[in-house]
Image: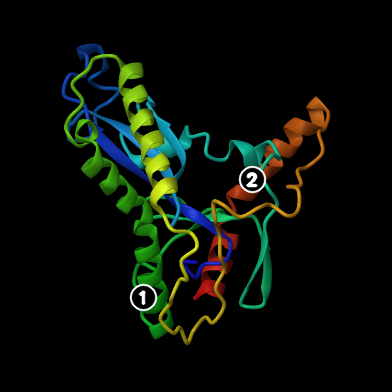
Amino acid sequence: MRGFPGMIGSIDCMHWAWKNCPSAWQCAYGDRKGAKSIILEAVASFDTWIWHAFLRVMRAQNDLNFFAKSPVFNNVLQGKAPKVTYCINGRMYDGPYFLVDGIYPRWSTFVKTVPYPRSAKEKHFASCQDGCRKDVEHCFGILQARWAIVKGVARLFNVESLRSIMMMCIILHNMIVEDEYDYDVVDEYEPDTMNNSRTRIYCAHDAIEEPVQHEPLESDGRYNELISQRYTALQKPYMHNARQIDLI
């Protein structure tokens, strides 16, 4: 739907300022400027539906430190993620990816923008990537506009209470999106001369015609080896560069 085949959403982090952070945790929840905040990591799709939310990690002063402890790829590492194949520029790829900003690493599961685009195609790709990546930022803005307790600073002392408040707001947000979004409306696109193929990545009310296939269970030794292989496969910068070039 966004013109990126195989893309399942955008991932980013939101900082929730914590006014009453306990003194013992001042360093753990503070950034390099001394501001105290709790970080929320979320994955959102084109309709601002939140598919993944992770909150409360100590000693995570920025998005990159927070991502290092995030469970967003647990299903992929355990072999429980659905198998996805798609074609870009005549080349077949397997494994979905997220649209991210510049702080994230150049992994095979991410697609970043071109920092200094020169050609017309690179500028067009950078414009599309920046626009679609803001789906998750748009989602954060809706959360803060809809729930005043999230827009303001956190005033409680208990981290679990703050986590429950944030998750409750996310659940209510998803309920509103599912109730109000019109998935049957005909989507109209501007003519795109560089990429004529469009891929619909999500529809909440579509029936699944074929069962989702997962990898078979393995023994403990083989299972740990597969996890190591999958984790190494996630960190392939050349796959990131090849997919980015094909998208351009």
In the foreground, 49 or 227: 49
Q: Tell me, for residue 197, which label it has, or none.
A: none
Tell me how far mark 2 sits from mark 1, CA to CA: 29 Å
Kindly indicate the quadrant of the structure image that contains residue 47. bottom left
Q: How many marks?
A: 2
Drawn side of residue 18 relative to residue 63, left or right: left
State whether residue 133 is above or below residue 12. Answer: below
State whether residue 200 is above or below residue 195. Answer: above
Q: Whole-percent x and y of residue 113?
A: 40, 65
Instruction: Give the residue at x 26% y 48%.
Output: 141
State whether residue 165 is above or below residue 134. Answer: above
Drawn side of residue 43 relative to residue 222, left or right: left
State whether residue 160 is above or below residue 141. Answer: above
Disc 2 is placed on an element classified as: helix
Return the residue at label 1: 117
Disc 1 is placed on an element classified as: loop
Contact? badges 2 and 1 (CB < 8 Å): no
In the foreground, 110 or 116: 110
In the foreground, 238 or 23: 23
Residue 88 visible, this orientation: yes
Instruction: Give the residue at x 50% y 63%.
Output: 184
Marked residue nearer the N-terminal end (2 or 1): 1
Q: Whole-percent x and y of residue 155?
A: 18, 21
Return the residue at label 2: 232
Instruction: Give the residue at x 43% y 77%.
Output: 189
* Type of the residue with mark 1: Pro
In the foreground, 26 or 79: 79
> Neighbour class for label 2 at 10 Å: few (<14), some, many (≥20)?
few
Drawn side of residue 15 relative to residue 206, left or right: left
Drawn side of residue 215 relative to residue 26, left or right: right
* Type of the residue with mark 2: Thr
